[in-house]
Amino acid sequence: MAQLQSPAELEEYRRELAAARAACELSVSVCAGAGCLASGAADVLAAFRRELADRGLDTRVETRGCGCPGFCERGPVVLLYPEEICYLQVKPEDVPEIVARSVADRQVVERLLFNGATGGNGVCASRGSGGNGNGEVVGEPAVHECDIPFYKHQQRTLLASNSRIDSRSIDDYVAIGGYAALAKALFEMTPEQVLEEVKAANLRGRGGAGFPAGSKWEGSRNAPGTPKYVIVNADEGDPGAFMDRALLEGNPHSILEGLIIGGYTIGAHEGFIYVRQEYPLAVENVTLAIRQATALGLIGSNILGSGFDFEIHVHRGAGAFVCGESTALMTALEGRVGEPRPKYVRSNVRGLWNKPSVLNNVETWANVPLIINRGAAWFTRSGTATSKGTKIFSLVGKINNTGLVEVPMGMPLRRIIEEIGGGIPGGKRFKAVQTGGPSGGCIPAELLDLPVGFDELAEAGSMMGSGGMIVMDEETCMVDVARYFIHFLTEESCGKCVPCREGLRQMDRILSRICAGEGREGDIETLETLSEVAGEASLCALGKSAPNPFLSTLRYFREEYEAHIRDKRCPALACKGLVSYYIEPEKCSACMICLNACPAGSIDGGKNRVHIIDQTQCTTCGACYEVCPPRFGAIKKISGEPVPPPIGESERTVVRKSKAR
């Protein structure tokens, strides 16, 4: 691969690649993201290549392992272009039929299409497929990707390219316009003009704080001292979040291109990608992308003959959550323990090695080439007055359609959860959605029409964060949710400052006591005091925002805290220390399923003998409750009320045969 020496050579190379792609009649994209690979996508891709070769179609049909298309709930996902036929949960044994019918005869394999059954989203799927609202499909299944409810309500700009390019091929990225923004910036714009375009777009950092990227860049550009650095924050540590991972795995060149443009703008000639150790595929793909771009002359000395030099290094983080904080990340890059430091001077002025440093997250950098190519006016057409563009969320938890979604800023939470996510499984009621990662907050059902934006979420007591969105149903205990996240943050605290190290530890202990049924009057007030001190006096943003899970759940679900403390009752029946199980004699069929499942041996019974749970031995693990057949529903879970006394021995020996059947 010869190095490109000018924008003209880049454009000529692009035309050649585009012509080669156009010569193929069809292309088959198989998701090669980490989630689908875990479900067998590599075997599916290999099966396609074998089958096409055996049929002599491999010269007419392209195959590519693409980035995550988002619908993780139904992977492995296969897309056939140009028709955009979308097949879900494809297995290697399905491939011969797909090739025979969809490739050779241009027919569809209906059993692999999205509908109420394959979609698994009940009411929402039936809406999208002409259903009757009861999860029954009335109309035709969705053939095309854009017809699937999960996709049709999104606005995919960053994720749109994931399924159209091979995640390990720079040629695919160049063919669809990749690195054109870099050439435009280097040869048609001055650094000041690039900066003004980013500022006009009002691109706010997608990593959590929402600080305007243009202002941050301007501070570094104007700061004294050299060298200067640009850094990608790919230390995505929020539970349930995988937005950055999907972009790094699926379209690494978009991040590299944005980073190089950022370096050109502020006068930096060296960039770093800080990626967490737990993302091996992302590390592999972005490292390969750097080698490919270097070989093509898009990274290194005299890029495209512009005279601009730029190098990129990948640094693998050790997995500490606190390293997502800017100063802790830079400290780790310097080879020291990843601990935050006071921000007497902002890191864009004195950051890495005390030099001006711009740190943005993966999604922020990936937006830069789009803004340069299409302009700030295009970018600001989407979003709210203060939050422009689109945002990627990882939609997980008690939701039918889990996966990555990209929506315009300002879309109400209700549309994301009900129309895209397909609602709550099992017909259960929505209770809350947690946004912003462990330091975020919980938004209740009464605020479901809240527009998703940086400022709107902050006013509601939560935050945008990097884009995690965890949905909870009526069976979720909000006190336990606060306990879980406070415990997570306690474990992840670096321990450098007392308000975070000791304050969070005390909050964790109190919340654990409350969930165990040992709450005391005054606990809520103590938690509020600890929250205030941590928020005001902690060294970094981790400690300052750590009380948010408690504060937001207290704000909207105070009655649950009071029930735990005063009534020794968990309204959601979720806290083990506050629930009991018992068997209703008139419903017990003596099937012995629960008896055999009980790990503590606390159930007494036998054939034709009503079962009884020995409350002194029961560990409230819930195994019996989970295995009791729904047609019997004999095991009940209660909280805050006495367990009915067991029946006498004479009553236990009689079980009606009709019930046994």
Image (cartoon, helix red, strand yellow):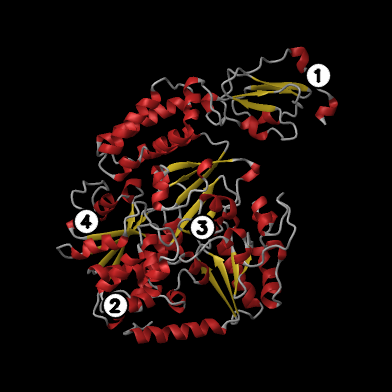
**Disc 4 from disc 3: Cα separation:** 33 Å
Q: Which residue is mark 4?
A: 351
- Say whether residue 360 is left or right of residue 660: left
Most foreground residue, 180 or 647: 180
Residue at left offset 31%, top offset 49%: 325
In space, the residues marked 3 and 1 are separated at their CA atoms by 56 Å
Q: Secondary structure at mark 3?
A: strand
Q: Amino acid at mark 3?
A: Val
Mark 4 vs mark 3: give the one in front.
3
In this figure, which residue is indicated by the disc labeled 3?
Answer: 405
Q: Earlier in the sequence, mark 3 or mark 2?
A: 2
**Pointers 3 and 2 in contact (C-beta within 8 Å):** no
Q: Nearer the viewer, mark 4 or mark 1?
A: 4
Residue 294 seen in the current view: yes
Residue where numbered disc 1 is placed = 654
Residue 505 figure quarter: top left
Spatial distance from mark 4 to mark 1, Cα to Cα? Answer: 77 Å
358 to the left or right of 252: left
Give the number of the mark in front: 1 or 2.
2
The disc label shown at residue 189, or none: 2
User: Sequence-wise, which precedes: disc 4 or disc 3?
Assistant: 4
User: Is residue 150 positioned above or below 526 on the image?
Assistant: below
- Residue 613: x and y, percent? 65, 21
Q: Earlier in the sequence, mark 1 or mark 2?
A: 2
Residue shown at 44%/22% (left/top)?
519
